[in-house]
Amino acid sequence: MAELIRIYEENPNIREVHKVVNILKRGGLVIYPTDTVYGLGCDITNSRALERIARIKGVKLEKANFSFICADLSNLSDYVKQIDNSTFKLLKRALPGPFTFILSGNNNLPRDFKKKKTVGIRVPENNIAQALVRELGNPIVSTSIYDEDELLEYTTDPELIYEKWENLVDVVIDGGYGDNIASTVVDLTGTEPEVIRQGKGNLEEIL
């Protein structure tokens, strides 16, 4: 059964953050708040944890479109091919923020993602998410628990999220009520930015 841990977004308690990160390092799954909907995540380097998430989502790991949650853009070159100056400026304007940017992956991707041509990069404007990634020392692989077939409360109220997910994950962070609109997904692999999914972020405001 999962543990429910309260962490305040304004000032995340480092002891609680440590506790969650230790669970992640041991291959645990965490549900955590972002600047959009709550996410389901694990350590990017843990194959067993990645397989668990893929199983929960009902997809094969090699075909799953998970996002890489980063604390900032400093580790971008670890996972994506070199980008031009205008693309980098766009990312700087948009992030942290409610966007997922699809970029071309490089040859240094973790083993489980070696066959992926592209990766989704996300830097949420949420202190809890950023603290987890910084403390972990590498990105969290993540997918939203947003589901249009579910009642709205399941994606916004952490206690209801816990009731639904307590037997599937190892820890649920109560970071207050979440949003019920997912991130805007923007493909940057072509000649022009292309919105794949319109969500909370408005691309026009940052172009």
Image (cartoon, grey):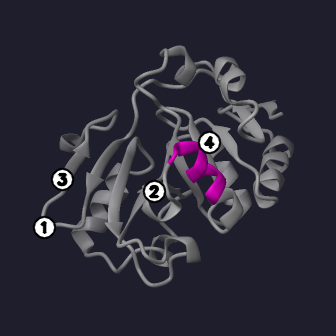
Tell me the quarter of the picture where residue 183 sits: top left
Instruction: Evaluate if marks 2 and 1 touch, with contact meaning CB atoms under 8 Å apart.
Output: no
Q: Residue at x 40, y 41 (%)?
A: 98
- Foreground: disc 2 or disc 4: 2
Residue bearing the label numbered 1: 191
**Helix, strand, or loop for circle 1?**
loop
The Cα–Cα distance between marks 3 and 2, rounded to whole angstroms, is 20 Å
Q: First in sequence: mark 2 or mark 1?
A: 2
Horizontally, residue 75 falls left or right of residue 18, namely left
Q: First in sequence: mark 2 or mark 4?
A: 2
Residue bearing the label numbered 2: 64
The residue type indicated by label 4 comes to Asn
**Helix, strand, or loop for circle 2?**
loop
Residue bearing the label numbered 4: 127
Q: Which residue is drawn at 34% across and 80% down?
A: 82
The residue type indicated by label 1 comes to Thr
Q: Report the disc number at residue 194.
A: 3
